[in-house]
Amino acid sequence: MRYTNGMATQLDVSDARVAAAQAEVNQVQATRDYLVALAELERALGRPLPVERKPIERVAAIPNQKEVNP
């Protein structure tokens, strides 16, 4: 919107998109690190690990491009 109104450059828009994508990657990595640490803790305590099997297509679903870049 700022770009459309002449208040930002294309570089500003690109930087914002890169920052948003990096934030999403950081969130996914943090979630993975948390789950790995939780599994390691459960294993160290001798507790069984809950395992949920899902088809790879559902786990690795690619979001609709229109949702990512409206």
Image (cartoon, rainbow, N blue to C red):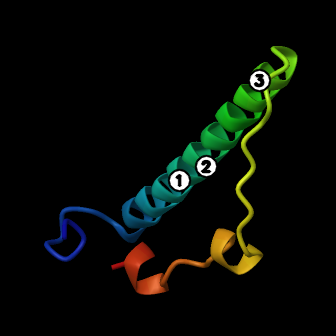
Q: Nearer the viewer, residue 38 or 18?
A: 38
Relative to 44, is 33 above or below?
A: below
Residue 42 lies, with reference to residue 11, above or below; the image says above
Between the C-alphas of marks 2 and 3, the distance is 21 Å
Quadrant of the rendered image containing residue 68? bottom left
Q: Name the image quarter holding the N terminus.
A: bottom left
Say which element carries label 1. helix
Give the residue type that dot 1 points to.
Glu
Q: Residue furthest left?
A: 5
Q: Give the number of the disc on residue 42.
A: 3
Marks 1 and 3, how far apart at CA: 27 Å
Q: Report helix, strand or loop for mark 2.
A: helix
Disc 3 residue type? Glu
Q: Choose top left, top right, bottom left or bottom right for residue 52.
A: bottom right
Residue type of the residue flagged with mark 2: Val
Residue beneath label 1, please?
A: 24
Residue at disc 3, secondary structure: helix
Mark 1 or 3, closer to the camera: 3
Image-based side of 7 in relation to 59, left or right: left
Question: Which residue is at 38% across, 65% downward?
Answer: 13
Q: Nearer the viewer, residue 44 or 37?
A: 44
How many numbered discs?
3
Q: Are marks 2 and 1 in contact (CB under 8 Å)?
A: yes
Residue 29: image location, x then y, percent: 67, 44
Q: Residue 28 shows which numbered tag?
A: 2
Q: Position of residue 56 (x, y in %)?
A: 76, 74
Residue 46 image point, x, y percent? 85, 19
